[in-house]
Image (spheres, coloured by chain):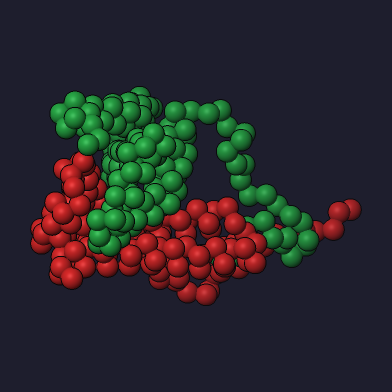
Amino acid sequence: MADPEAPTVDGASRPLSPHLQIYRLTLTMAMSIAHRLTGAALYFGMVLVAWWLIAVAAGPNAYAGLAWFMGSLFGRLILFGYTWALLHHLLGGIRHLIWDTLHGLEPVERERLAAATLVGSIGLTIVIWGIGYLVMGGSR
Amino acid sequence: MNTPHRIVTPMRRVRGLGAARSGTRDFWHQRVTAVAGIPLTIAFMIIVIALMGRGHAAVAQILGSPLVAVVMLLFIVNTAYHMWIGMQEIILDYVHDDRLKLPSLMANTFFVFAVAFASAFAVLKLSFGV
């Protein structure tokens, strides 16, 4: 594809459209950015999934190492962040799919959907970890 | 008087070259894998929560059982394709210098294949029990 900022035939360089920094930050915009950031974080987070599965397949010793790391404070912080990022990207994805159908785009609706993404992801993360600690007795 | 400027729009450059034909493929595939990813991600989270705190033998047995293994493999393949498109989009948005862009696109492909094959191989090994 042609570089949009490449000089035209007469040598003039023409910026085509203003970028993020000139707009007032809105909730939908922040959630859009968060969707991309959580997506990028989950991209690298898949290394943890691969590590987990490989450790189980490799045997009890490898699995013990992984279980120790995930049970440590640092490991739990990563898993807590992972849980939130996954839920936020999941809910944000559903919101984008709704918008793809041209529903929920009115000023009030789109703000509500964006807020629901944030509230929902934080709420569900706390609920899931609450279940993990209360019902299952936490890390064993 | 000013010399007249020639304005060459992007449309002028591509007119007559024919349709790109594949312009919306990534967009569409990202949505297909997003829709598939909803039930698969929920299933993945349920599997992880169910395995929390269990010993190695139980985890290995459950992950290798046919239903769980198939769901995990679908999750891995679907997620790998979704994150490959997503990271490519991020790279194309922010990296404009070919010397950095092309290696970044390659690294994206290598990373996704490595993670997906490692994960899938582990599940298959557990499932076929060697």
Chain B colour is red
Taking the view exactly as shown, the residue that stands out farthest to the left is B66
Residue at 69% over, 60% down: A6
Q: Residue B126, position in %: x, y?
A: 19, 64
- Label count reads 0
Residue at 19% over, 30% down: A137
Find residue B116 and report its image quarter.
bottom left
Specify whether residue A3 is in view: no
Residue at 33% over, 49% down: A66
Q: In which quarter of the image is the C terminus of chain B?
A: bottom left
Find residue B57 and report its image quarter.
bottom left
Q: Residue B32, position in %: x, y?
A: 27, 57
Specify whether residue A23 is in view: yes
Q: Nearer the viewer, residue A75 or A47?
A: A75
Chain A colour is green
Q: In this view, does A19 lie to the left or right of A122?
A: right
Q: Nearer the viewer, residue A79 or A84?
A: A79
Above or below, B39 relative to B126: above
Above or below, A106 relative to A47: above
Taking the view exactly as shown, the residue that stands out farthest to the bottom is B17
Find residue B128 and report its image quarter.
bottom left
Residue at 65% over, 62% down: B97
Q: Residue A36, position in %: x, y?
A: 44, 44
